[in-house]
Amino acid sequence: MPNKPIDYGPIQTTEALGRLVRAHRKQRGLTLETVSGLGNLSTRFLSEFERGKETAEIGKILKALRTLGLEVIVRPRGQGSSDDRDGAAP
């Protein structure tokens, strides 16, 4: 059964970021334990991050994203690339 495409794009909440990261990790066939070992992060932290914990440390979040091959791009709303979806907050 093919994987559902991941909707990468603007993120407005910690829950949305966590869901995206979990989907990306699972699509790559990685377990929390594997990512934990690769990024030197605890599985507890990764699990809480994927569940949208708002108090997660930004440095650890960035490390987890790098470990998974993801990056953060910050730009003013409405000035995104051509793949931005309609409906993003103005």
Image: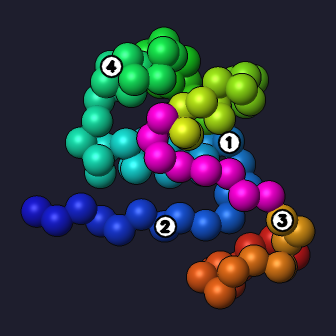
Q: Which residues are magenta?
A: 67-74
User: Which quarter of the image is occupied by the N terminus?
Assistant: bottom left
Which type of secondary structure does the marked residue at label 3 adopt?
A: loop
Q: CA distance from mark 4 to mark 1?
A: 21 Å
Q: CA distance from mark 2 to mark 4?
A: 24 Å
x, y percentage for residue 22? 43, 42
> Label 1 crowding class (10 Å Cα cut-off): few <14, some 14-19, many 20+?
some
> Tags 1 and 2 in contact by the CB under 8 Å rule?
no
Along the polypeptide, which appears first: circle 1 or circle 2? Answer: 2
Does the stretch in magenta take in 36? no
Indicate the amino acid at tag 1.
Thr
> What residue sits right under mark 4 in the picture?
33
Q: Residue at x 74, y 29 (%)?
A: 58
> What residue sits right under mark 3 in the picture?
75
Does the stretch in magenta take in 73? yes
Q: Is residue 84 above or below residue 69?
A: below
> What residue sits right under mark 2 in the picture?
7
Name the side, left or right, on which 41 lies relative to 9: left
> Label 4 crowding class (10 Å Cα cut-off): few <14, some 14-19, many 20+?
some
